[in-house]
Image (tube, helix red, strand yellow):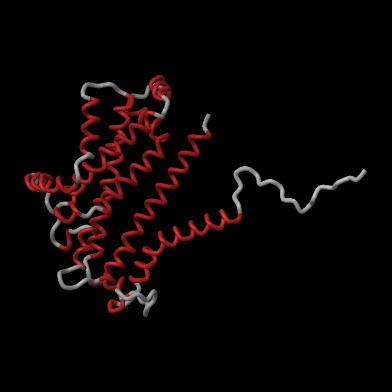
Amino acid sequence: MTVTTPDKTARAPRARGSRSPLASVGLHATLLVASVVAVFPVLWILLTSLKPAKYAITTDFVKEPNLGNYRYLLEDSHFLAWFGNSVLVAGVTTVLGVFIAATTGYAVSRFKFPGMKPLMWTLLITQMFPMAILIVPLYNLMGDLGLLNQPLGLIITYLTIAVPFCAWMMKGFFDTIPVEIDESGRVDGLNPFGTFWRLILPLAKPGLAVTGFYAFITAWGEVAYASAFMVGEENLTLAGGLQTFVTQYTSNWGAMSAASVLIAIPAAIFFLFAQRHLVAGMTAGATKG
């Protein structure tokens, strides 16, 4: 009787869910191409900001790199004034937007009061109007109130954009927090605002982080209202100030690229800050019993 031994060269069946070498190569190639497509514009702007003005629109990646464009921005333009105006407007919009959206979302999530549904529908409907059609009525309104060319006018305008969406988002987030936490706060003698401030807000860090980031980006990168409501180079925000580098006959691409790099830094820092709190808040909520 002959005994057959298993063929050691035979391949074991591939585990379920594993990829073939060809599929792995295709996946990694696709991810590599997507990464290049995503990074290339940012890298190109960074390299352009380091080129002299005469080479700004050439296809050379690096051509006599220097910091002349950044020196021009900081010394020969109103960039620092624009930056300060944007920080003021975006910072106040973020703080007020988060507070108003959080308190509105909590009130609608926890309490029943007359006009609650019309209020939420109003917040929702305001998001349906394009920004372009609101410029003229808001301009007239700000003019009647004496808020044109004032940071307060921009702050109020940006709050009308950010708060409705953020309030809806916070309302949905507060709906996921058990009502028993509010009841325990009332048992301990806290009033509704004390319960909201001391018990609910610490659990709402993920929602607050996303809300704050949305409000900040709304005010930091908005162009239409900033250009229409603010005049005079010293009063412009960054979005309006960049337009001064492009005229009917000339375009200072080097200065615009350098300004774009500097403008992106605060937004990136704010995003990293919000992301850290978002991940930390979700992890803490998942581990508590």
Q: Give residue 78's quadrant in the image.
A: bottom left
The residue most toward the top is: 187
Position in image of residue 22 (x %, y %): 58, 56
Extreme-front residue of the structure: 1
Q: Is residue 180 left or right of residue 122?
A: right
Q: Residue furthest left?
A: 144
Residue 25 placement, left or right of 64:
right
- Residue 255: x and y in percent read 27, 70
User: What residue sits 25% from the left and 55% below the top?
Assistant: 86
User: Is residue 61 shown above or below 137?
Assistant: below
Residue 121 in percent (x, y) is at: 23, 30
Q: Which x, y percent locates residue 182?
A: 39, 24
Question: Toward the viewer: 35 or 135?
Answer: 35
Residue depicted at 34% across the width and 64% down the height: 261
User: Where is 201 relative to 159, above or below?
Assistant: above
What residue is at 41 percent from the left and 35 percent from the top? Answer: 202
Picture quarter containing residue 263? bottom left
271 is higher (above) or lower (below) than 73: above
